[in-house]
Amino acid sequence: MKAADDVDNRSTVGGPSRQEGTPANEFTAKLAGTQELAAAMPYNLNKALEHGEIASCPEKGQTIEPSDPAIAGSTLTETIASEKAGAGDPRPGFNPGNESLDRVRVDSSERILTTNQGVPVSDNQNSLKAGYRGPALLEDFILREKLTHFDHERIPERVVHARGSAAHGYFECYEPLSKYTRASLFAEGGKRTPVFVRFSTVFGERGSADTVRDARGFAVKFYTDEGNWDLVGNNIPVFFIQDAMKFPDLVHAAKPEPHFAMPQASTAHDTFWDFISLMPESMHMLMWAMSDRGIPRSYRMMQGFGVHTFRLVAEDGKSQFVKFHWRPLAGTHSLDWDEAVKLAGADPDFHRRDLWEAIECGVYPEYELGMQIFSEAQAEAFSFDVLDATKIVPEELVAVQPVGKMVLNRNPDNFFAETEQVAFCAAHIVPGLDFSSDPLLAGRIHSYVDTQLSRLGGPNFHEIPINSPVAQTHNNQRDGMHRQAINRGRVAYEPNSLGGGCPFQAGAAGFTSFREPVGGDKVRGKAERFADHYTQATLFWNSQTPVEKAHIVRAFRFELTRVQTPAIRERMLALLVNVANDLAEGVAAGLGMPLPPAQPRATQNPAVPEIDVSPALSLFARPGNGGIRARRIAILVADGVEGVAARAVSAGLAREEAVSRFVGVRLGRVQGADGGNIEVDVTFEAMPSVLFDAVVIPGGEQAMTTLGNVGPVVEFIREQYRHCKPILVLGAGKSLAESAGVKLTLSSGEPDPGVLHFQGENVDVVLPQFVEAIAAHRHFERELDPPRV
């Protein structure tokens, strides 16, 4: 940069007025350039456009390009390079904080150990002492740094959704949705958008078990080219409450009771049911939570929902309401309650491990995104209010339209840096999307940002690598705890002329809220249609199969049996009477209580529902694609086992991408009846029955006799049978199966489709039937409550 001859080359008080060839000339030239830049903006052109109807179509901000990039820079010395300050080549208009996570990944291979200040550590075994047996010295900065950092490694856990697992992946749009939305991720077929997904339980703490009965979080961060969109949902499409005002009360009631901090990750206690029994709007959510949806088999086999009604906004400003649905291609499947309880002890990380191992093995979880799109006129005609988060829009009224697929294909490198520090927020949306007036959603828009301030240490949590967008971020927000960006230039406000007007408002290209007419008085209350608390709970109950209904009764029975105050149980029964008599009678019988009169309804004239049954609400309507990828199958072995058959079954299951394991009494090798050896993968002690989806008993007289004399083996088979899992019995394995109580036929005399016995058939004939049985997940035809001994 050179000073112009017609410019008064006055310098600062620290330098001469003119000295050719010195930085003073560059400095005064910068002053001259700054004057030119400021003079080119004599007034704010857009100010007159901020008022009245014209403001609804904002104009792009006024900008002027400086004659030299250095004019808008912080310092003329920015071109001086160093290993720390940088290459000396400024990149105007660029934020490197939005580059990929490669910029922060660290690998220490072939590197010496250092302190956080880069000082090489000579001895990482001993603290500095005055003599070998003398006191430790305060000057030991290496020890102090190590301990201080260790003492502060934990951050506050989330108040809810503390226990979670996550994965990277992508979302691919099927077809352009420009008819409905200008959102860039839906702009063209085949377009891929990076995502980071976190699954979680809701009420349990960070160290609780995965398989507790609870709703599950299903939060997706889309890194779109127009900013981050967080679709922060659950595996249940409704919620307990209608207004965010009650959220702290709900969580306080569900968390461990404050006087003794029990129970952990469980709603089976007095304070939860005391609250719920006085909040009849919770009945629909309770039906879902007490169903098998509350104990999913896997995050890979779990639906997700946006819960609230949102808006799609098209380029022309027109809007439609939308509900978001995630459908797992592997099907929606659940655990058995007895199985879930035992899994919490056998492997508290069951869901976390299942997700991680599936991705590591290349069995990438896949989910289809569907939308229910409907107009405001349709919404007004429904018997329920779409702004009520305790209500669904039945698929019979508005079909779910598949719009794209999400694939999770990469595990995090570091759990804390990614899974723990990721910050989801319901307020994070992008152009083409908008909020509805759902009062629960309104509270979430505030609360999610607010909680990150304390959990992640301040307002700059968006700069944590996992949270930073891939879209470039440029604004005038500055400073705060843990600030990482080093902003170039002296301008931190808008409008400005000294920075050429940059960063400038995007105008119509930026996010604009839907122009929704708003009227009415300021009030505290709810719309009248919010008062119907039971119709959709009844719809859910009526849509379940007899097996699913029995499980719901069993869940209520368990939870309320743990309640110590009889009046609370009675109050809950009075609510259930309003849902369905047979439900209330089943729960009352399990509690040994008479059926009380129904609780008074909030409305005596609920609208007539459009439908009474919705088959889509049953898990049996969502079997998935029929595959058995990543399912775990136990093959029981001991000396004398039919090794040829055992190995053939294992190989056949591997071709289906299932995970088979040879399970024995001890690790080591067993010798098959054919003389070949089989390496035992795991033991009955280390991996009990609940960790497997199916079992193979491959036969061999000697092996069956040996296994039949081992108690855990018999219990292993018995539990597989009780939990309605597929069992393949080959040859002499029949005697072991029968000693465990396995029957080949149902009580009706019909064959049990989940128990397959073959005497001498070729495995290639046997395997397809077994695969089909595994794909069915469970065979509830044999289920009894209570189970047989």
Image (tube, rainbow, N blue to C red):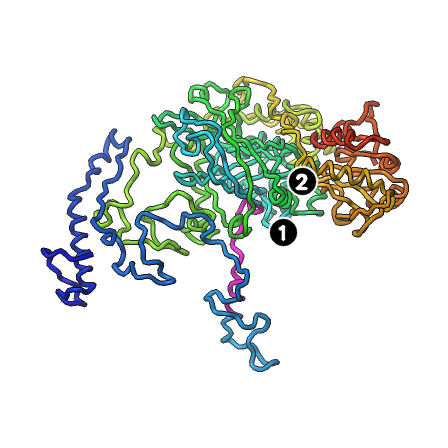
How many neighbours does mark 1 have within 10 angstroms: few (below 14), some (14-19), or many (20 or more)? few
On the image, which quarter does residue 84 sit in? bottom left
- Is 154 one of the magenta-colored residues? yes
Q: Residue 364 versus residue 2: which sits nearer the camera? A: 2
On the image, which quarter does residue 484 sit in? bottom left
- Is 298 one of the magenta-colored residues? no
**Alpha carbons under labels 1 and 2: distance apart:** 15 Å
Magenta span:
143-164
Residue that label 1 marks: 260
Residue that label 2 marks: 563
Q: Residue at x 85, y 44 (%)?
A: 672
**SS type, badge 1:** loop
The quadrant of the image that shows the C terminus is top right
Say if mark 1 contacts mark 2, CB within 8 Å: no
- Amino acid type at circle 2 is Val
Q: Residue 525 versus residue 787: which sits nearer the camera? A: 787
Across and down, in percent, residue 475 comes to 33, 46
Across and down, in percent, residue 677 comes to 82, 47
- Amino acid type at circle 1 is Phe
- Looking at the picture, does residue 294 appear above or below residue 206? above
